[in-house]
């Protein structure tokens, strides 16, 4: 086959993959699903604080890059449909990251099948699509992490280009306020420039002041001991005893429907070996260093390397996996056939999750506004609404948007899961008619069954629930 035709097929294939990635991201965003608990916590801050106050400590243990929060709040000025407005920056970042990833793949990979393989994983990965429509900064993390790493390949590192260096320096200075993990990418670029003794080191003169202010801000305004403890599972133990489990949990999270997870491990290991073998090349250093840095930060308990907090690292992981196709064997006919089969295999399993979760709309949701509307239609002004502890954040955000009358509502502060605990606390309530709003829990199935069992032991129980155990539970207590 002529080389020109091969090239055209390659560009058509990656274009189709990028188009599929864009369509899936827009489609999922268009559903406008209600905010779940974590999003509601951030939405409360966006709705209740001024732009300036978003640079100060946030409520509900939220630690979000301030300029990302400002941008989300700014989008909210143009419509009262907060689910669309507040999530718009994440969608824009998710879409923009697609061509940027391809540009990064072009700079770090040589084999066209490897580039197609990596692009397919990136475009179709469910978690990358999901966080392109969630009110959290993780999609922005991916975009700016990629942007900083890609910038290294587009600067002339042997001579001083004042205009270009100023622009890139300003980009670095601003990026850190949109994404904390972009700092990790800047460290990688700095390290490369330092090792190579390149003039591009002067780029870091401009963002130096921003870094100083940022460190002061992190220390005084953006720390959360509770959140640090929450992500404790993402930190590597001193003896590395939990490292295999940590890797396994990450693989399960990023490849949720992938039955042959051993292939993920083998391909990453093979790509890592190849990267290490040719570590003297910049394109391999820039892939390996972020992984080593992520391990180090997790080991030092500075930043977790765990599920969504490590989403920024996923593009590098995919590219290292694609390095498996770099050896000369995969340029031969039989090698190309094997590589093509592997690429199709991974792409098919990756799309399987998208098909189920997005196209068939089986994604997880917390339907707080719908249940509050149901409560509004059915309840009497003498009824009492019970809000379990972990549902309270959802309730706090949506109660005003639902325009509920000023009826009685109580929050059960302890986190109750087992039936005996639920019975013990609920038995202390006075006689009356009660509704329980339940949408979020640390152990949702267990708590739902306990609440359901208690309601069924009371008079005139009525349980309205869905497949995700979001429920409005009614009972009369004598």
Image: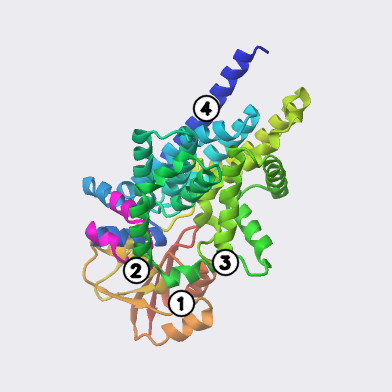
The residue beneath circle 1 is 415
Is label 1 or label 4 in front?
4
Calculate the distance from the C-alpha at mark 1 to the C-alpha at mark 2: 30 Å
Q: Residues within 10 Å of mark 2 (few under 14, many from 20)?
A: few
Labels 1 and 4: the sequence-earlier one: 4
Q: 246 left or right of 160?
A: right
Q: Nearer the viewer, residue 338 or 292?
A: 292
Can you say whether 388 is above or below 277 in the image?
Answer: below
Labels 3 and 4: the sequence-earlier one: 4
Tell me the number on the disc at residue 16.
4
Secondary structure under badge 4? helix
Labels 1 and 2: the sequence-earlier one: 2
Labels 3 and 2: the sequence-earlier one: 2
Is label 3 or label 2 in front?
2
Kindly identify the residue that appears in the image at 68 percent across and 39 percent down.
278
Q: Nearer the viewer, residue 120 or 277?
A: 277
Disc 1 + disc 4, Cβ < 8 Å = no
Measured as percent of width and height from the top left, residue 128 is found at: 50, 45
Measured as percent of width and height from the top left, residue 303 is found at: 51, 61
Tell me the number on the disc at residue 220.
2
Measured as percent of width and height from the top left, residue 342 is found at: 70, 35
Calculate the distance from the C-alpha at mark 3 to the C-alpha at mark 2: 25 Å
Secondary structure under badge 1? loop
Can you say whether 162 is above or below 9 in the image?
Answer: below
């Amino acid at each position: 086959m002529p080389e020109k035709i091969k090239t055209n097929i390659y560009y058509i294939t990656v274009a189709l993959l990028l188009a599929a990635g864009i369509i899936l991201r827009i489609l999922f965003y268009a559903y406008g699903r209600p905010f779940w608990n974590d999003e509601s916590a951030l939405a409360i801050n966006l709705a209740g604080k001024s732009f300036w106050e978003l640079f100060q400590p946030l409520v509900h243990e939220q630690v979000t890059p301030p300029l990302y929060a400002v941008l989300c709040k700014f989008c909210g000025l143009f419509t009262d449909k907060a689910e669309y407005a507040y999530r718009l920056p994440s969608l824009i970042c998710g879409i923009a990251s697609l061509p940027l990833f391809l540009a990064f793949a072009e700079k770090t990979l040589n084999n066209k099948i490897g580039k197609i393989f990596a692009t397919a994983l990136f475009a179709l990965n469910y978690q990358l699509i999901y966080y392109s429509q969630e009110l959290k900064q993780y999609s922005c993390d991916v975009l700016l992490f990629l942007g900083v790493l890609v910038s290294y390949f587009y600067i002339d590192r042997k001579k001083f280009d004042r205009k270009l260096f100023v622009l890139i320096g300003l980009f670095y200075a601003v990026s850190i306020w949109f994404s904390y993990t972009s700092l990790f990418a800047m460290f990688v670029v700095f390290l490369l420039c330092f090792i190579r003794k390149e003039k591009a080191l002067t780029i870091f003169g401009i963002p130096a002041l921003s870094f100083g202010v940022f460190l002061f801000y992190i220390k005084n305004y953006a720390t959360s001991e509770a959140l640090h403890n929450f992500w404790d599972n993402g930190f590597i133990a001193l003896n590395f005893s939990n490292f295999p489990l940590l890797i396994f949990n990450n693989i399960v999270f990023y490849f949720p429907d992938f039955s042959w997870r051993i292939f993920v491990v083998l391909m990453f290991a093979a790509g890592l070996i190849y990267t290490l073998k040719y570590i003297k090349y910049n394109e391999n250093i820039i892939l390996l260093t972020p992984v080593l840095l992520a391990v180090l930060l997790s080991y030092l308990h500075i930043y977790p390397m765990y599920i969504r907090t490590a989403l920024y690292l996923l593009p590098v992981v995919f590219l290292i996996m694609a390095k498996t196709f770099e050896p000369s064997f995969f340029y031969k006919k039989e090698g190309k056939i094997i590589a093509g089969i592997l690429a199709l295999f991974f792409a098919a399993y990756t799309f399987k999750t998208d098909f189920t979760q997005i196209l068939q709309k089986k994604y997880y949701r917390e339907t707080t506004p719908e249940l509050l509307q149901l409560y509004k239609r059915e309840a009497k002004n003498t009824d009492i609404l019970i809000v379990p502890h972990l549902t309270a954040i959802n309730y706090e955000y949506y109660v005003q948007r639902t325009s509920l009358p000023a009826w009685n509502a109580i929050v059960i502060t302890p986190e109750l899961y087992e039936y005996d605990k639920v019975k013990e606390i609920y038995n202390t309530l006075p006689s009356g008619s009660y509704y329980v709003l339940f949408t979020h829990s640390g152990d949702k199935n267990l708590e739902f069954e306990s609440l359901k069992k208690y309601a069924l032991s009371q008079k005139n129980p009525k349980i309205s629930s869905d497949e995700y155990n979001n429920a409005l539970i009614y009972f009369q207590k004598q």
